[in-house]
Each structure stands twice: as C-alpha cells, then as structure tokens.
Image: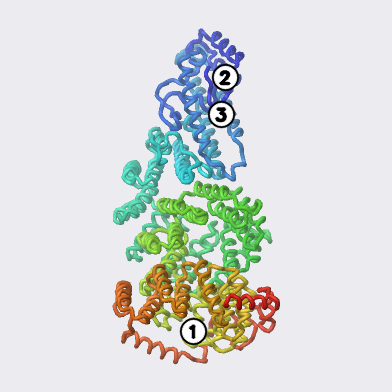
Amino acid sequence: MSTLIHQGRLLSILSEDQLMARHELKSKNSNFSRRRCSSGPHVACSVLILLSLCPSILSFSQIPSIVSTRPVSVNGQIRVDNSQKNPKRFYEKIIHGDDDFVSSYEFSLSSTSSSSETHQATEPDSPVRNASKQSKIEKQTQQLERTKYKTQHHNPRKKHVRNNNNNHPRSNGATHRNNSNTKRCSIRQNHKRKVRHLYSKAREMERRGLWKESCEILEYIVLDLEPTDAHSYLALARLESRRERGQFRRWRQGGDSGSNEGGEIPDEESNEDGKDKGGSRAREIFETGTYHCPESVHLWHAWAMHEQSLGNLEKARELLEKALALDPGNGYVCHAYGMMEIQNGNFEHAKELWNKGVTNRPSAALVCSLGQLYVSTGDPQSARELYSANFSLLPSERERIEVYLAAASLEETEFNDVAKASELLKLALNDGRTQDSRPYVALARLGSESGSVDDNIVRKRLKEICTKQMERVLKGDAAFPVKDGRLFNAWAKLESKSGRLKKAKDVLKQGMQLYPEDHTLLQAAGNVEERLGNVTAARDLYGASLMVEPSAPTLIAYAMLELRSPSENNTTNITMVRRLFQEALLIDPKHGPAYNAYGNLERRQGNVERAKQLYQEGINANCTDASSVYHGLGKLYLSLGEIEQAIDVLQKGLDFFEANEFTHVQRNENVAFLAHTLGMIELNINNNVKRAKSILEQGLKRCRNSSPLLLGVAMCESRVGNEQRARQMFEKSIIADPDHAQAWQAFGVMEMKAGNYRSAKTLFECGLKNSPRHGALWQAYGTLESRKGNVANARLLFAAGIQKCPKHVPLYQAWACLELRDGDVLTAKRLIGEALTMDKRNGSGWLVAAKIEEKSDNHGLVGLILRRGIECSPNDVELYRALAEHEISRGKIDNARELLERGLEIDPLNAPLYHSLAELEARVFNIEGLAKLNKRAAELFQADAMTPSLSSSKNMQVWSKKIKHGRSTKIPDTVAALAEKIGVGNDADLSIAGVSLDEVDPESLVERICGFNEENNLMLEARASVSNK
C-alpha cells in the first residue's frame, strides 16, 4: 500500500502484521451478505479494529469524505463527489479488498492531506494559540466517532427484521415500527447534538484566536458529519476569506524583499500576482454550501459580502438578489444591499431597500441607517418620526437601545434639544433595569458635543454612577444590572486625559474587580501602566486581555509597546511586531488603526512602497475607521515632501466621509485630524486662509467640540485681522480642552502682538498651570517679558522652562538671543552650543550662532558656521539667505547669487529670497537679471506683488489703529473668567506652574547644563581668535 499523507506529516508504510490482519479479515468475510447476514454490525466493528491496528491508514474524519453526495476536499477545495451512492458499500469494498477502490481512496486522501499541509504552512502562528494542541482536537474528534459507531452497532437489543411482515405471530408490527422509529430518532438527535457541540467548539476556538483548529473542526462537520449544516459552511467560509486576505498581504510583504522572511509564499496554484488561478477557496466553500443549503439566506448574503470585498460588485448584486428572492423582507440583506448602493452613489435604491426592510422586519441597523440618510439629505424631521415609530417594534433590548441612542443624538445635534435627548436616554435605561451600559455613558456625556458640558461634569457624572455601583456590591445588595465595564473605562479615560494616571489606575482596578472577564478593562489598564513607565506590568495586562479575548486594539497596543520598549536586549523585534499587526488584521480585517499603525511601522523602517500598499489596502477594505488610514497616507506623502499628493489624499478622505455622512463613524476625532492637517497645509504652506477656514469648518460638522479644529479657525481669523472672532474661537477651543497648551500659547501670542500684554501674561500663566511641560508656553512667556524690558524675569522664565522641558531646543535659542541682546556673548555661546548639540538639524540654531560670532567680530567663523548649518539642514532657506548676505558683505557677488538661486530651487514661493536677489541685481545694475526675476515672480505671485498697493497700505493703517487701541491695561472679561476658572490670580506673583521663580538660578543652570568652566572659556576664545585670523 502506498504511503499516505495525514495532516501534513509523512507516515510510515503499513507493517506486514497489519497487512496480514487485513487479509485474514478479508477471507473471513468472503461470504458477506448485507441482507441475509446478521453480523453486519460486527463486520463494521472489524473495520474499526482494522483501523485501530492501522491508525495511519486514515482517520475517522476522512472515511466518509468519498461517500454518497457529501462534499469532499480535493486540492484544498471543497467539492461535491457523486461517485459513491451507498455509504455501506464503502465499508464492504474495504473489507473485500477492492484494490482499485482503495487506490483511488488513497489518492483522494493524499490530495486532501496535501491541501491540509498547504493550509498549515500558510497559516501564521498566533501569539494566543498555545491554549490547546492539535492532538487534543484529534482525540476529541475520534472519540466522538467511536461513540457514534458504538451507538449504531453495539446496541444490546436484538433488531428483528421481518421484511415488513406485520402478521408475524411473535411480534406486533406497530410496536416494532414505533421502537425502530424511536431508535432512529435517538440516533438522529445524538448526531445533531454532536454537530452542535463541535460547532460551538469551533466558534470558541475562533474567538480565542485558534483559527486553524477552528477551520479543521468545521471542515470535519461539513465533510463527514452533516453536509447540509449551513452554519458550519458560513463560519468556515468566513474564516477562509479572512485567511486568504491575510495570506495575500503577507506574501506581498515578503515579495518586496525577495524572500519569505516576515511573509508567506503563496500556494502552488497561485500566479505571479498572488491570486489563485482556480479561484478563492472561500468562494468554493460558498458554492458548495449553497449547493447543499440553497434555502440559506445567510449563506447567499455572506457570499455577496465576500464578492464585494473583492470588488466584484455585479456578482455581489446577483447574490443579494437571490437572497431577496428567498426572503424579500430580510433585514440583513436589505441593509447590506443598501450600504453597497450608498457607496456607489445609488441613494434612491438604498432608501427603497431600507424602507422595504423596515416595513417587513425592522432592525436597529435598518432604522438607524435610514434615519442617518434622512439627516444627510436635509430631512431630520423624517428621521425623528422614523425613530419614534420603531421604538416599540424592535425585538430585542439591544436594538431598542441603539435606536434610542440615535434618536437622542439627533435631538442634541440637529434640534439642539438636550432635554428631549435626556428624556430618550432615560427611557432607554428602562428604570435602571437595562444591562447595556451605553445609555449610562451617553447620559453622562450629554451636552458635551454642543460644548455646554465640559469633561469635568462628565467625569463627575461617571464617578457618581460607578460609585453607586460599587456601594451596592459592597453592601451585598442586588448586583448592578450592567454587565460590562464600559462605565469604568470611560471614567478612567477622562482621568487619564487630564493627566491623573494614578487615579485612572485605581478606577480600572475597581472595574476589573467587578468585571474580571472584560478584556477592554485589562487593555486600558495596560495602557495606563505603560504611560506610568511600568512596562512589565503593561505587557502582563495586555497578555491577560488577549487570553480573555483576542482583539485587534489589544494586539496593536502590544505591538506598539514592543516598538517603544522592547523586551529583549533593548532591540526591537520587528518580525514579532509585524506578526502582531498581521494577527490584528486577521481578527478584524476592517480595523483602520491596524492598517495605520502597520503602515507607520513600515514608513519608519524606510519601506515607503510597502507602507503605501498597506494604507491603500486599508482604504480598499472600507474600514470602519478609514479616516486614520487616509490620515496616515497623507502624513506619509508630507514626510516625502509630496505636498500635492498629500493634499489630494486628505481631501479624498474628507470627501469620502462627506459622501457617506449617514454612516456611523466610530472615531470622529480622526476625521477631525484629517480636516486639521489639510487646513494647516492650506494656511501655513499655501497661505490660502479662505480655503483653510472652509476645510476646518467642514471638520467641525463631524466633531463640533474638537479643540484643534476650533484653534485652527481662530488662527485663520487672526491671520485676516478679525480679532474679535478669533478671540471667540480661541475661547471655545480652550473650553473644549483646557489642557490644550497650544491653544493657550496661540491665544497669548495674538494678544501679545496686539499689545495686550496683561491679557497675554494671564493666558500664558493659565496655560502653564494646566501644561507645565509645554516648552513653547515658557518660551512665549519669556519673550513677552523680554519685550516689556524685564530681562531678569525673562531669564528666570527661560531657566524655569528648561528645568521643566530640558529637551525643548527653541528655549535655549530664545535664551541665547536674550543674552546676546544683553551683551553676555559668552553665555549666549554656551546656550546655543548646547542647543546645537541636541539638534544639529535645526537651522535657527545655526543662524543664532552666526549672529553671536558676527557680534563678536569673528567674521571668519560666520561663513564657516552658516556653511556647516547648510550641511546639517539643507532645506532651511534662511541659511542660504544669511550666507548670501555674508558673501555680499565680502564682495563675492557671484557666490551670493548662486546661494539665493539654490534657495529658490528649494522654496520657489519664498518672497524674502526674491527680495534679496532683486536687491543684489540692482546693486550691480544687472537690468537683464532684474527683468528675468520680475518675470519669474509674476508667474508665481500677483502682478503687483513686488510693489505695495494702496489696499495694502490701508490694511497697514487699520492694523496700526488696532494695535494702538489694543494696548489696554484692563484684562477682558472673557480672559478674566478663564483665569478664574483655572485658578490663576491677577496679582503678579513669581510662582508659575508649581515653580517658584525666586528659587531659579540661571547662572548655575547654565553651568550645569552646558558644562563650561573658566578654562574652557579661555580655550574657546583662543580658538575663535585663531579662526578669525
């Protein structure tokens, strides 16, 4: 007998004793007759004995795979085999030694097992798969098979077969038939019970991340036990679809580098593009499943979703139409069909489908989607009526709560009726009997979207609910009806956002005591431990969360932890991190943050093309949070200097969510990031204030309380001189997030430029109290004191800022400029030297260093320093302009012209460079050069850009009046209210952000951070004099 392959491992040839046992069994049963002989069960037992003697021949899970019209696995694909009509003849042919039959069966086994081997080779190892082994599953399956045959063939009761002769004198025909039916019913019930048990086991393994083992059990069900079990086909096809997408992604990753390290090699039947020549195995399973279960609407629906994910929209429509033909009012099919039509712009067809589904069989998904469609088309009243009409029609509490939440959000955002929203949420609570925590969280956050409620009020509400829950448990009263830890998670998130990490840790600890099986609490606790610096504890908590339930967010958090704090030899295991990201995408192929984090990893590793591919896969997968993927791809183009491509990608992301406004976006803050990044590009790079403001306001429609977006609008208003409107937006931004340090800093800078020094001082102090480690706030406050002439206070502020933010390079530069203006050149040199030591690529540091040497009359060092700065920061055009000015002072006109031209190549829109080059050409009377320069400027700028216009002069006069009238010693009421809310007094004390300025010693700080002594100073002066000569 030829060698057999079983589960991907080569087994030995049968021994002579085993062959002899088979021969004796054959001769003993040579006169076997199915109808006459009553020893049929014993013969079947002999087959089992043979199989027990020869376990390598075949497993019980493989015997029936060629019987009757059952599906079989051929070359890794499930197909229908009609070659054998009678299952019993299968055993006869083995007993009587039909060599042709045995040979054909061995070939079928080899094909099946080879497919299993390929499946095993392509399936990635899961970090959570060590909970069970392959051998356990085999033993359970074989034990169930033995129980089956024992039940069928070892029943001690005699079975009298009288050829339907009801007149037999020793038996009653009716009684005999009843007993036989009872026996057959019992066997059928046991069979169904085994199928249900195995199906539950497979789904449990899938939930725990054991996808390969789950597939094997499901294959065993549909191949061997019950070929008409639609649920098993559905689960198996979905797993295979997920596996195929992951396999293709890993193969493409390995193909870029020319090896399979970190990836997998595709199957032999795959072509060079990585797609199967014979089609998707998941598609084969769907075809076989619908062949055996043609009435299963769920199978047709799932098959359509699979085809849609592959881009086969026409095939998906055809399958959905078949599903609707079976069940015209099926809510799942109507909802999925409508979503697909919406994505392709067929809004009317989607509305028709959803109305049909709501009329026949309403569900929360249908009602909420249809309501959002009404809102997006400008008809919120129809959405309100739809929600109100379907509250009592929904079958389950979970679905009713979803509609109540959608209705409450509609009342708050569209009708601004917070009282009505509160009433709806209280109805959803069902007098405190609901087990869903979402209404409690929504009620606690009520008013925050409109800006009328801040995080402190939300925190207080959540604390009250959670405290009441803990008190009931401690008193031994009836348990709180909520069955998950979402309330504790929301409370801890707010505490963490405010910087109270230890308090967040305590909150999560309480939640884990009440809900030890909530994996989200374990993940959140791991995140808090990581931020506290307890890397080992964070890793343990992430692992515990994965053991409870594998989830994509936890795997991403684990991967990011390994990137930031590697566990072995302080060397990041990039292969392990990649496998964690792949595992996350296998669990949830539509998890946008997984694509974003994975793409960011490849970008940092220098694999730009691979990062682009991952971002594009996330976009094509139609993720639930595609905004993060669009944002990641846009940031990638920005890092490459491809501004136009970045703008195009970010705009596509915004257009996508604008066109799909009806959809539920789980992370509105990521949509806000899209709008903020694109708006800042238009404002700071393209100098298009109108366009920037429009984009930011578009983002505010999605996230009304986004502090970065409100800050961006404020900066736009400030840029055009609308100070009153700018102040209003600054205030909204600060109220939305009091810890947003950049909002305090930008607000204070605007007031400082307007001459409102007292308001600026108050704003800087408020910002520093909330964010004492924000270096830009210390720098702006020190600059304010310097402008007021308080050099000593400015020096103290710069020193205090460096104590709090020792890595903030602009603080050293600003302090060096202060000392340079005050005449302390040596201290300025020390400070700028320390700044350049920390960051040599910062062009401003080289400019300050050159100014210091120029003031010290070390002109020889000025050119050397600027050239060194260009080497370290080649894209800083101000360095080119400064070096050109230095060359002009030395009479080297050609060198200066070349430097300015190089600067214009880097930044063609830099107006100061054109101005410097025009002055240079005018100085040497180069009329032809001036004409060419004027032509270049006219193509890029307005026709009158080189000369001031009358309108610009009027604008300057308006700005002059504003500044003069703005110099007020009185703090505006709004700023005073903010200061009072933060807790900053109006008196001029010298204690800021917990730092007493009286205790700050700038001189000792300079000595400590710069490490210079008198001997070093003399050596530095000697070196400077030599270089100057």
**Residue drawn at the location 36% of the way across and 78% of the way down:** 921
Rounded to the nearest angstrom, the CA distance separating label 1 from label 2 is: 89 Å
**Which element type, helix, strand or loop, lies under badge 2?**
loop
Callout 1 touching callout 3 (CB < 8 Å): no
- Residue at the spot of label 1: 751
Of residue 718 and residue 184, the one placed in the foreground of this image is: 718
- Residue 1015: which disc? none
Q: Earlier in the sequence, mark 1 or mark 3?
A: 3
- Residue 9: which disc? 3
Callout 1 touching callout 2 (CB < 8 Å): no
Rounded to the nearest angstrom, the CA distance separating label 2 from label 3 is: 13 Å
Rounded to the nearest angstrom, the CA distance separating label 1 from label 3 is: 76 Å
For the question of whether residue 242 can be seen, the reply is no
User: Residue type at mark 1?
Assistant: Glu
Residue 108 to residue 307: above or below: above
**Residue drawn at the location 50% of the way across and 87% of the way down:** 756
Q: Position of residue 961 (x, y in %)?
A: 41, 91
Q: Position of residue 568 (x, y in %)?
A: 65, 51
Residue 93 to residue 197: above or below: above
Mark 1, other Cα within 10 Å: few <14 / some 14–19 / many ≥20? many
Q: Position of residue 3 (x, y in %)?
A: 53, 21
For the question of whether residue 27 can be seen, the reply is yes
Residue 519 to residue 768: above or below: above
**Which element type, helix, strand or loop, lies under badge 3?**
strand
- Residue at the spot of label 2: 13
Callout 2 touching callout 3 (CB < 8 Å): no
Q: Earlier in the sequence, mark 1 or mark 2?
A: 2
